[in-house]
């Protein structure tokens, strides 16, 4: 009788006994991005890299993925990243996700570690990730993410700093603030100060740029004697995050209307690209009011190369400035140029309007000393590994020192 009763109880409760947790993949959060998700088996997923195209449906870039996996603790997972090929400057390519661009993962969405091995299948192409999570929820990304929330927390931390002023110069297409920061010691007169402009995160996938921007801000607002002296002798004008809409939606390099924010500085349209219009106006208004621009810099990330480029200065008026800046940068362990510095071409090499980068546009408009730095996301020759957020922040501090020393020569 007892045996029969036990069997009845087991039969009754068996539908309610939980099997192993179902694994799920999701990107529905700030900065998250993933295309089609296909479940091959309980522990094997094919995940499309979402990518984005421009206003003409061209130049698809699949440079960004950022997603969460739930229910995978202690289970051997296989995740295949697919839909990688695209275009860059109207030329087809195999995509930005390769065997050299190893993914990053986190168990708390704050501290990030590199996945040290992945299988890249060239013919497909496909990047296969194998891992056994130590937590029931993990996050995976192309590079360690930096979202609007990161910047908001940083600015709250320094909200009462006397050397920091915050200005909203316009709204994005989606109504987010376009922020311009000014850092200087207001007790010192402005007349003799050098003026340095910086832009971070023109392209939303390039999160390393924002980590460097945070490092720059933390250093400039610190009690370090060098930073104190820099605030007394210079004015720093900083766009800390140039594409907040793209960062929020997990975009790549285009605004909400499909315009590349570093490819349209000769075709400014306040309706279609308010981000460029606001940034350009803020810079040129200062110049037209009689204020100097001693150095301008936009910081970017790319996959496998690291380089420094000056304005399209055919006359060479900024050659000595470029060489001095490059020399100081190259002395730091956080910058590893893969080629000598060079001036940019005067205009786009593609027979299509709206392709000028910011350094071309500002030089054409006011002959400004505008420079660009690209930093690699793959294995760094000086560091011997892929750069971490801490490495990027250190570069931000190094960059501020190099810029200031360059203009104070």
Image (spheres, helix red, strand yellow):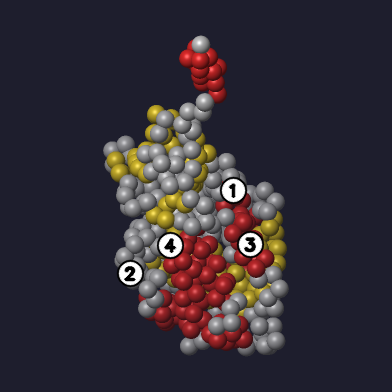
Q: Is residue 58 above or below residue 9?
A: below
Q: Kindly identify which residue carries mark 3.
A: 153
Tell me how far mark 2 sits from mark 4, CA to CA. Answer: 13 Å
Distance from the alpha carbon under mark 1 to that under mark 2: 33 Å
Q: CA distance from mark 2 to mark 3?
A: 31 Å
Q: Crowding at label 4, few (<14), some or many (≥20) Cα neighbours within 10 Å? A: many
Q: Secondary structure at mark 2?
A: loop
Q: Quadrant of residue 267?
A: bottom right
Name the N-terminal-most of marks 4 and 1.
1
Coordinates of residue 27 in the picture (x, y in percent)? 53, 41
Asked which secondary structure carries label 3, the reply is helix
Relative to residue 51, is residue 177 drawn left or right?
Answer: right
Residue 144 seen in render? yes
Q: Earlier in the sequence, mark 4 or mark 3?
A: 3
- Residue 17 lies left or right of residue 290; in this view the side is left
| Badge 4 vs badge 3, beta-carbon distance below 8 Å | no
The residue tagged 1 is: 30
Residue where numbered disc 4 is placed: 388
* Vertical order, 239 against 121 (above or below): below
Q: Earlier in the sequence, mark 3 or mark 1?
A: 1
Q: Secondary structure at mark 1?
A: loop
The residue at the point 43 percent across, 37 percent down is 47
* Earlier-in-chain disc, 2 versus 3: 3
20 or 373, which is in the foreground?
Answer: 20
């Amino acid at each position: 009788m007892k045996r029969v009763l036990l069997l009845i109880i087991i039969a009754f409760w068996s539908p309610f006994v939980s099997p192993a947790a179902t694994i799920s993949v999701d990107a529905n959060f700030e900065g998250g991005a993933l295309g089609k998700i296909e479940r091959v088996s309980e522990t094997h997923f094919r995940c499309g890299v979402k990518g984005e195209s421009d206003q003409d449906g061209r130049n698809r870039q699949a440079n960004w993925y950022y997603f969460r996996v739930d229910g995978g603790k202690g289970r051997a997972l296989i995740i295949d990243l697919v839909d990688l090929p695209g275009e860059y400057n109207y030329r087809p390519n195999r995509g930005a996700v390769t065997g050299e661009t190893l993914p990053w993962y986190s168990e708390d969405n704050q501290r990030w570690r590199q996945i040290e091995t992945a299988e890249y299948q060239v013919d497909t192409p496909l990047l296969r990730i194998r891992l056994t999570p130590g937590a029931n929820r993990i996050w995976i990304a192309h590079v360690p993410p930096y979202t609007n929330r990161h910047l908001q927390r940083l600015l709250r931390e320094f909200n009462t700093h006397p050397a920091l002023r915050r200005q909203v110069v316009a709204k994005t297409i989606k109504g987010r603030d376009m922020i311009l920061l000014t850092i200087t010691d207001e007790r010192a007169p402005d007349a003799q100060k050098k003026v340095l402009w910086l832009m971070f995160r023109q392209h939303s996938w390039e999160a390393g740029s924002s980590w460097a921007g945070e490092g720059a801000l933390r250093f400039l607002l610190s009690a370090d004697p060098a930073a104190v002296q820099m605030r007394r002798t210079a004015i720093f004008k900083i766009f800390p995050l140039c594409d907040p809409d793209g960062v929020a939606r997990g975009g790549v390099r285009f605004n909400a209307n499909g315009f590349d924010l570093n490819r349209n500085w000769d075709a400014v349209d306040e309706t279609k690209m308010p981000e460029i219009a606001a940034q350009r106006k803020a810079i040129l208004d200062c110049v037209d009011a009689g204020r100097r621009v001693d150095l301008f810099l936009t910081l970017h990330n790319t996959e496998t190369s690291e380089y420094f480029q000056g304005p399209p200065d055919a006359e060479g008026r900024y050659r000595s400035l470029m060489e001095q800046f490059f020399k100081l940068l190259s002395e730091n362990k956080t910058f590893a140029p893969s080629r000598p510095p060079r001036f940019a071409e005067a205009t786009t090499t593609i027979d299509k309007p709206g392709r000028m980068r910011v350094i071309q546009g500002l030089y054409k408009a006011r002959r400004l000393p505008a420079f660009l730095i690209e930093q690699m996301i793959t294995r760094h020759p000086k560091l011997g590994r892929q750069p971490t957020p801490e490495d990027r922040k250190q570069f931000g501090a190094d960059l501020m020192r190099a810029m200031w020393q360059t203009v104070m020569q």
